[in-house]
Image (cartoon, rainbow, N blue to C red):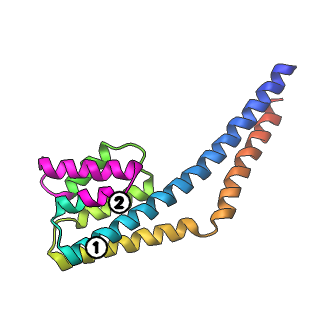
Amino acid sequence: MTWKWIGAVLVIVGCGGFGFLIAAGVKREERYLRELLEAMEFMTSELQYRMTPLPELIDRAACHTSGTLWQVFSALDRELATQIAPNAEACLRAALENTDGIPTLTGRVLRMLGRSLGKFDLAGQISGINFVKDACRENLNKLQKDKAERLRSYRTLGVCAGIALAILLL
């Protein structure tokens, strides 16, 4: 009998933990998008006022990021330096493939950024980065809309699913 109760508690904790894990993933996605937006703001300023070449721009942008985004920008810098891939988009794709832990929305925004890097003149480059920044802001606003209620719902749903499953198993 006690084994059933221990099992029920473990099911509840496991499902509740899954709900908390989903909520933490949403917070992490928001943090990455915010950091990527700051890096793109920096890149725009560098292009406007210093006309920094692309490899140096990516290297400097890497200094303004941390964690997984730093890994992506550092890998992109290495890819651009070795010039194995034909363009910046392919280099960024390779950098994303070599980096684990990039959330879905952040990965999409980074791929959009790759499509605009190194293809146009200065005005086109700035315009492309501004377009990507707008997409990043839109994703960030979607995540922030009713954030507290959604996170609470994810956690509650996980715990309730665990309780329901435990009741069914008892």
Identify residue type, mark 2.
Answer: His
* Residue depicted at x 16% and y 72%: 120
Q: Mark 2 to mark 1: distance in Å?
A: 13 Å
Identify residue type, mark 1.
Answer: Thr
Counting from the top left corner in percent of width and height, residue 112 is at 31, 64
* Residue depicted at x 66% and y 47%: 19
Q: Residues within 10 Å of mark 1 (few under 14, many from 20)?
A: many
Tell me the number on the disc at residue 44. 1
Q: Residues within 10 Å of mark 2 (few under 14, many from 20)?
A: some
Vertical position of residue 159 compared to residue 140: above or below:
above
Assign a secondary structure to mark 1.
helix
* Residue depicted at x 69% and y 40%: 15
Quarter location, residue 62 = bottom left
The quadrant the C terminus occupies is top right
Span highlighted in magenta in the image: 59-88
Residue bearing the label numbered 2: 64
Q: Is the C-beta separation of discs 2 and 1 under 8 Å? A: no
